[in-house]
Amino acid sequence: MEAPRERTAWLQGGGAVCRTPPRAVAQPSRLVLLGPPGVGKGTQAQLLSAHTGACALSTGDIFRIAKSGTVEHPSPAMRTAVACMNRGELVADDIVLSLVHERIRCLTCRGGFLLDGFPRTVAQAEALDQLLQQERLHLDAALCYELPAETILARLTGRRTCRICKAAFHITHHPPKIPGFCDHCGAPLVLRADDEPDAGRVRMAAFLKSTAPLISYYRGHGRIRMIDASGTPDDVFRRTLATLHPTVATR
Ligand code: AP5
């Protein structure tokens, strides 16, 4: 798998600029990825990013960066957000929306975007629609991945994430070449605090309460695409491309 794009502007926010410019694409992909925690959204976002040239933008990654201690002066709002994330709870809409507003350049990027983990509530989806409308941009589709709960749990408990570039591996389904280290940047792989079983249960409950209604929201707007997330990552990716065609131009 190709290394994730560096996404400096997304991860650092504010005036940060990506060192690598976006790939020039005639028709940039603009997609939202939905589904329960651990269903494989991040994995598919990486595959789609390599295929379409758009960056995979995860709000969860922003909170994990804030938690990593590399941000010099995290705001009180960011500290509250990190505490919510570690417990598996959703972060309040106003905090998430202010972070996304700060990163509006990523939504208007000529490479397009693949939003993973945002929106997560109907209020966030409405705010995203408003932002895109203001910028005269159009969301191609909302991809919703589905899988039985017991398979999801196995994916979550076996996940190991790169401390630096945030690439996800799995101890059995997608092991790194050198155990414990990232294939892309060589940094150590870690178990996310919110992958501990208690936080995992809270995340699933938060998904059912706040995120599941998003499926009806996007269905109402004719933009939902339901995708079976069983099988290998490549199986799921083939289904994803089949679902998108001809909605999204891919290279
Ligand atoms: P976030 O980082 O968005 O986590 P999530 O949505 O819970 O999703 P995950 O990253 O856990 O799973 P995934 O579906 O991406 O699965 P992956 O591809 O890694 O959010 C974390 C927290 O931040 C939230 O709980 C919340 O607190 C906060 N937050 C973030 N955004 C927010 C927002 N907008 N509003 C409010 N709060 C917000 O795959 C999982 C594992 O399975 C991996 O090990 C992978 O290798 C493996 N795998 C993947 N696909 C397959 C396959 N097909 N077969 C076998 N193994 C597979």
Image (spheres, rainbow, N blue to C red):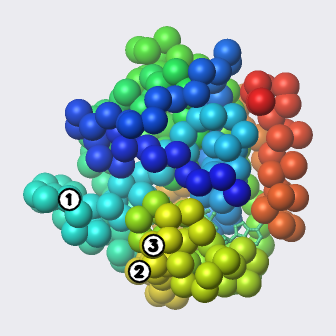
Numbered disc 3: secondary structure: loop
Numbered disc 1: secondary structure: loop
Left or right: residue 10 compared with residue 110: left
- Where, by quadrant of the figure, is residue 146 drawn? bottom right
Amino acid type at image mark 2: Ala
Tag nearer the camera, 3 or 2: 3
Q: Which residue is mark 3?
A: 187
Picture residue at 28% right of the left edge, 41% below the top:
13
Amino acid type at image mark 1: Val
Q: Which residue is mark 1?
A: 71
* 21 shown above or below 150: above
Q: Which residue is mark 2?
A: 193
Judge by depth and name the residue closer to the eye, 125 or 58: 58
Amino acid type at image mark 3: Ala
Judge by depth and name the residue closer to the eye, 158 or 165: 165
For label 2, being within 8 Å of ligand 1 is answered no
Tag nearer the camera, 3 or 1: 3
